[in-house]
Image (cartoon, rainbow, N blue to C red):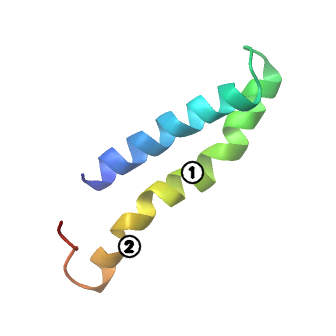
Amino acid sequence: MNKRGHVLNGLLLALGLGFVLEPGVDAATARAIAEITVPVVLGALFPDVDTAFGRHRKT
C-alpha cells in the first residue's frame, strides 16, 4: 500500500468514526469528523515512517 492508500484509508476511517461517535447529519457530526481526521490520518501514515530511514520493510 502506498502513501495515498494509507491517507485514503485514514480519511474513510475518520468519516466512519465520526458517524459512530455522533450519529446524524448535523454540525456535531461534522465537528467530530474534523476533530478525528488529523490524528487518524497521521496514525495511518505511521507504517511508512521507516521510508525516511532507508528501505521500507516488506512482508
Q: Establish if 22 lies above or below 32.
A: above
* Mark earlier in primary sequence (1, 2): 1
| Picture coordinates of residue 1, whole percent (x, y) | 24, 52
Residue under the point 31% across and 55% down: 3
Name the residue type under label 2. Val
Residue under the point 74% across and 20% down: 23
Residue 27, numbered label: none
Which residue position holds label 1?
Answer: 40
Helix, strand or loop for disc 2: helix
Q: Establish if 17 lies above or below 19.
A: below
- Where's the C terminus, which quadrant? bottom left
Helix, strand or loop for disc 1: helix
| Picture coordinates of residue 15, whole percent (x, y) | 58, 31
Residue 50 is drawn in which quadrant?
bottom left
| Picture coordinates of residue 43, whole percent (x, y) | 52, 59
The mark total stands at 2
Which residue position holds label 2?
Answer: 49
Of all residues shown, which one is farthest toward the top?
Answer: 25
Q: Nearer the viewer, residue 20 or 32?
A: 20
| Picture coordinates of residue 36, whole percent (x, y) | 67, 45
State left or right for residue 4 relative to residue 11.
Answer: left
